[in-house]
Every structure is written in structure tokens, then in C-alpha cells.
Amino acid sequence: MTVKIRSENLNLFYGQFHALMDVNIAIKPQAITAIIGPSGCGKSTLLRCFNRLNELIPTVRTTGRILLDDHDIFAPDTDLPRLRKRVGMVFQRPNPFPLSVFDNVAYGLRVHAMRSSRAEVEAVVESSLRATMLWDALKDRLTLPALELSAEQQQRLCISRLVAVEPEVLLMDEPCSTLDPGATEHVEELMRTLARQYTIIIVTHNMQQAARVSAETGFMLLGQLIEFGPTRAIFTNPSDRRTEDYVTGRYG
Ligand SMILES: Nc1ncnc2c1ncn2[C@@H]1O[C@H](COP(=O)(O)OP(=O)(O)OP(=O)(O)O)[C@@H](O)[C@H]1O
Ligand SMILES: [Mg+2]
């Protein structure tokens, strides 16, 4: 089995608080992996480990290893901006910049100095908006302020912004939690399409969503990864009693 991201004995502390305990997980490439579990169990913390975003919090200490394509992301020679370009993050609330649609998508190209000519930037903006199926709706309104878009379009735009810099992994932390059911369905459809090209890890409170979109699912409880495996097995035939209690709705 090929693996895109692997954690080995991953532990994370917020000061004295032990938030992740010996997490060992292997994420398949070009597939959707879901992380589920009750509030506060460490889902977002785990997700933020994969591009070292937790390190923006001063009290955080991490032990263990995370391998991205077999290379340890904690190695001293890791280029953090490059890591975060390869492993992009979609947040719960869409967070477009207060710029035009065009400038949101072109933003990362400028930061990473990836394209030089105007024509090249325009081509990437178009292909990135096509990738999230926004192009037809927005091609005549590229100067519109992004904050005037609907919530669903804003979330799609944030995904376009990541796609523009050619990531390998997309981390999505409850990306549909502020969307209505129709928009949620559209974004799930988009995720399935994107998974043909990218490795996607989604955190969700919505077990139906995990069951609908993911190939593999991990169940977390109190900082531990209790069970990890094919989504169907996690939902229909879990091997741990705690997983069964959660997926049958016995925990909050
Ligand atoms: N910056 C921080 N400083 C201290 N403790 C934190 C910090 N961020 C999270 N925690 C704690 O770490 C634990 C895991 O938090 P995390 O946000 O990863 O959980 P979660 O599973 O994503 O929860 P939710 O479903 O509510 O989003 C919680 O007990 C939380 O209070
Ligand atoms: Mg969270």
C-alpha cells in the first residue's frame, strides 16, 4: 500500500495538556480520509500537525514523526512555506481575503513567486476556478470582492486559492459546517472530484458525511486514534466498542 502521509508515535502537548497520544496513522494518496470523534478529542489538532500549523501556538510541543512521501516534515531542513504550499488547509469558516475573486486565486502565485507573466497568472486563475466549478459563474465577475460571494462560493474560492499553487494534500477542517444542505452536497461532490488528483483529509462532525465521501475513517477519542480503517468497516463493523458507541450515536 502506498502512503502519502504517515505519523509515527505522534504526541502533542499544549503546555502541560497532552492533546495527542501516540497517534499512528497512514493516509492513502488520492483518496479521502475522514477523521471523526466528539468535540475536543483532537481532530483539528491532528489535522494541523500535517502542515505544522500548530507551531504558530507558542506553548505547543510535538514528539514523534510525520512522514510526507517518506520525508520527515520535522527535519531541520524543512522549508515551512513550501510544506504549507504542498499541504494546504481549508477552514471551517470560508476565509477569502478582502480582495477581488481574481486576486484571491492569484495570491499564492505571488507569494510563492510561481508565475511571472500576466497571461500565465490568468491561465492559472482560470484553471483553478474551473477545478472548483466556479469559472462559469464568475468569469465575468473576476473583479468582484470575494466577500460578496455566497458562503458556498467563498468556500469553493478558498479551495481554488489552494489549487492554484499546486498542492498535493488538502486538509479540510469541517469545511461544510457553515453551509446549508444543498451547498454541502455540492462541496462533497467537489471533494470527490478533487480526490482523483489530491490527497484529502477531512475532519467532520457529520458522520453521514464521513460515510458518504471517505474511503477510510479514523475515530478519535480524548487524544487517541482509537480505530482507523476502511470507512465501511468503521461504520458497519467496528472492532472497538468505543467506535461502535460513537457511530451508533451513544456519545455526544
Ligand atoms: N491553543 C490551545 N491551547 C490549549 N489547549 C488547546 C488549544 N487548542 C486546542 N486545545 C485543546 O486540545 C484538545 C483538542 O482540541 P481540538 O480543537 O483539536 O479538538 P477537536 O476534536 O477539533 O474539537 P471540535 O470538534 O470541537 O472542533 C481540546 O481539549 C482543546 O481544549
Ligand atoms: Mg476542531
Image (cartoon, helix red, strand yellow):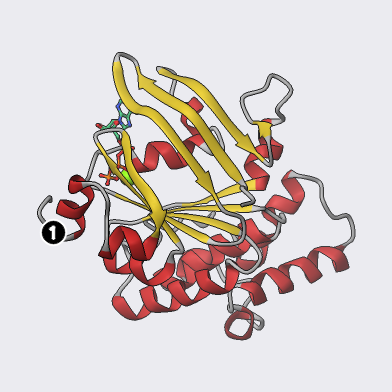
Q: Quadrant of residue 44?
A: top left
Q: Residue at x 71, y 39 (%)?
A: 82
Front in this rendered view, residue 38 or 23: 23
Question: Which x, y percent locates residue 10?
Answer: 46, 27
- Badge 1: residue crowd in 10 Å (few <14, some 14–19, many ≥20): few
Q: Residue at x 66, y 65 (%)?
A: 197
In the rendered image, the vertical position of residue 222 relative to residue 208, given as above or below:
above
Question: Which x, y percent locates residue 242?
Answer: 19, 46
| Residue 104 seen in the figure | no
Q: Which residue is mark 1?
A: 249
Front in this rendered view, residue 2 or 171: 2
Q: Residue at x 60, y 67 (%)?
A: 101
Q: Amino acid at mark 1?
A: Gly
In the rendered image, the vertical position of residue 147 relative to residue 34, given as above or below:
below
In the rendered image, the vertical position of residue 208 relative to residue 55, given as above or below:
below
Q: Quadrant of ligand 2?
A: top left
Front in this rendered view, residue 251 or 135: 251
> Assess mark 1: CB under 8 A from ligand 1?
no
Question: Which x, y percent locates residue 25?
Answer: 47, 41
| Residue 191 seen in the figure | yes
Q: Residue at x 31, y 58 (%)?
A: 234
Front in this rendered view, residue 59 or 219: 219
Q: Left or right: 231 with respect to 238? A: right
